[in-house]
Amino acid sequence: MFTLIKRFPPLWPKQHTSGHVLGHIDSSQHAEIAVEAKKRYPDLAAEIDDLERELMPVFSKLDLAALHAQDRFRRQHVLLIVGAFVVTVLGGAQAAFGAKQAVPWIAVSQAALSVGLGGFATYVNRGAAQARYASHRLKAEALRREYFLYLAHAGLYVGSDGGRAAVLRGRVIEIETGEAKS
């Protein structure tokens, strides 16, 4: 039960930690990981510097945007579910009192809440929070793929010439703007 509640979206937008391709870590640890990686793998130090400069700021921005859009989408749907539950309870109360003991405020509040929920549902569908989440997450994951391809000298990054950083910069821009071919 507590796990279910723990996964509920926050009622108010929360501050997420800056993302990293290795997972969600505290931003203070981000620099430590890069320094440690350069110590452990000195042959990759230049590549890690390129990635930290060109790719990681964009990845962090897209990852955070995806997390915020996901929270918004979930929060909106939880509100719709809670609102529908309240409308149902009001309908049950109205039915329980029956026609002999008509309680007009129950019917009026049920109708008002139903209309409000209908408007909110329309807003949620037009708001496209899920589409924004999917778009930002897809771009962030594409950048994660580029991170590892760059380190492995694979894909577009085959070769050891100085043009790899320029190719990386171009791929980051393509992915961020949505022009990437995949």
Image: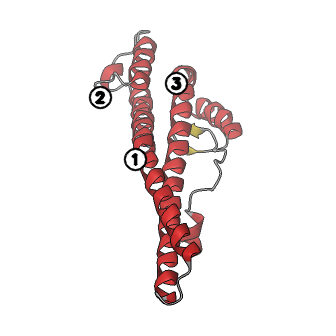
The foreground one among 121 and 10 is 121
Where residue 151 appears, x then y in whole percent? 44, 28
Find the distance from the CA under tag 2 to the CA under tag 1. 28 Å
Report the front residue among 89 and 1. 89
Dot 1 amino acid type: Asn
Image quarter in which the N terminus is found: bottom right
Tell me the quarter of the picture where residue 101 sits: bottom right
Residue 110, placed above or below residue 164? below
If you read the primary sequence from the N terminus, does the residue marked by circle 3 or circle 1 appear first? Answer: 3
Are circles 3 and 1 on residues that touch, CB within 8 Å? no
Q: Residue at x 63, y 56 (%)?
A: 11
Q: Is residue 20 shown to the viewer in this render?
A: no
Residue at far top of view: 162
Gap between marks 3 and 2, in whole Å?
19 Å
Q: Is residue 113 above or below residue 127?
A: below
Looking at the image, is mark 3 or mark 1 nearer the viewer? 1
